[in-house]
Image (spheres, helix red, strand yellow):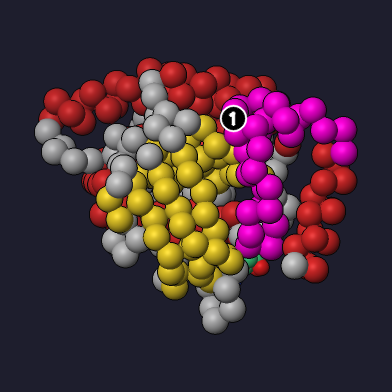
Amino acid sequence: MLEVRQVRGGHDRADVLHAVSLDIAPGETLALLGPNGAGKSTLMAALSGTLARRSGTIRLDGEDISSLPSHLIVSRGLALVPEGRHMFSPFTVADNLRLGAIRLPQPTRARLAERHEFVFGLFPRLAERRSQLAGTLSGGEQQMVAIARALMSSPRMLLLDEPFLGLAPRVVEEIHQALDALRSTGLAMLLVEQKLDIALTFARRACVMVKGRIVLEASSAELAARDDLGELYFKLARAATRG
Ligand SMILES: Nc1ncnc2c1ncn2[C@@H]1O[C@H](COP(=O)(O)OP(=O)(O)O)[C@@H](O)[C@H]1O
Ligand SMILES: [Mg+2]
């Protein structure tokens, strides 16, 4: 589904990403773990085409999307739910969804209606609040809008950058359930998450990024069975520094 090979890149002259490679199978959920500043969001930007300077190869269902601009990457079926949600705050929920649908391939009236029905089915609360300004919603509701907005383009693969950050446990649970429902539709997902327990219960496989490198890749069961997980980041960070 997604094939990432030797991706390098950064925001200014120094590389943040050092030859990152990873694979996601159709319908698979992969968790990307790693401490703050590891480069997880930078990788999301590279994959979604918003990182100006990048090299390496990114293939989506075999098609090389490495040098496509971000709007074409969305219309190919890869959508990002960015870190910090990035709502269009002065716009209503409905407007935010409409903006998400701009890259929907063949945006017929029926297709748009189907997309609305899908996201409102997933997050019924958004249907109730469709005329409310996004900026006046709670954090959890804003996260729902961010996910719904990405889903309006009918993606086959969804990148989620720390969707649970700063949310109350009850809302985390609610969004977790929505993501479970999405997974059961066959949507492939790459979930960036700092909390191991959330990541490992959500994804079957996880990789750990430290200082712009994937330093570990394992099944979630394997990772969960380690009793030194707390120290793991620290050790890996040291190893990455030496390497
Ligand atoms: N817009 C930016 N301009 C310059 N440097 C950035 C920018 N965003 C992130 N960085 C730097 O890139 C590195 C990786 O950051 P980031 O990808 O946000 O990490 P993570 O998402 O894993 O916390 C950090 O050193 C950070 O300071
Ligand atoms: Mg980040």
Q: Is mark 1 within 8 Å of ligand 1?
A: no
Q: Where does the image place residue 107, in percent across and percent down from the top left? A: 15, 37
What residue is rendered at 51% in x and 32% in y? 29
Quadrant assignment for ligand 1: bottom right
Q: Where does the image place residue 131, in percent across and percent down from the top left? A: 36, 32
Asked if residue 67 shows in the view, the reply is yes
Q: In front: 143, or 8?
A: 8
Q: Eyeballing the image, is 47 above or below 12?
A: above
Quick check: 120 left or right of 171? left
What residue is rendered at 39% in x and 32% in y? 26
Secondary element type, mark 1: loop
Q: Eyeballing the image, is 125 above or below 38?
A: above
| Residue placed under numbered mark 1 in the picture | 203
Q: Eyeballing the image, is 196 above or below 18?
A: above
What residue is rendered at 63% in x and 22% in y? 173
Asked if residue 45 shows in the view, the reply is no
Magenta span? 199-228
Quick check: 84 left or right of 64? right
Query: Hey, which quadrant is residue 39 in on the image?
Result: bottom right
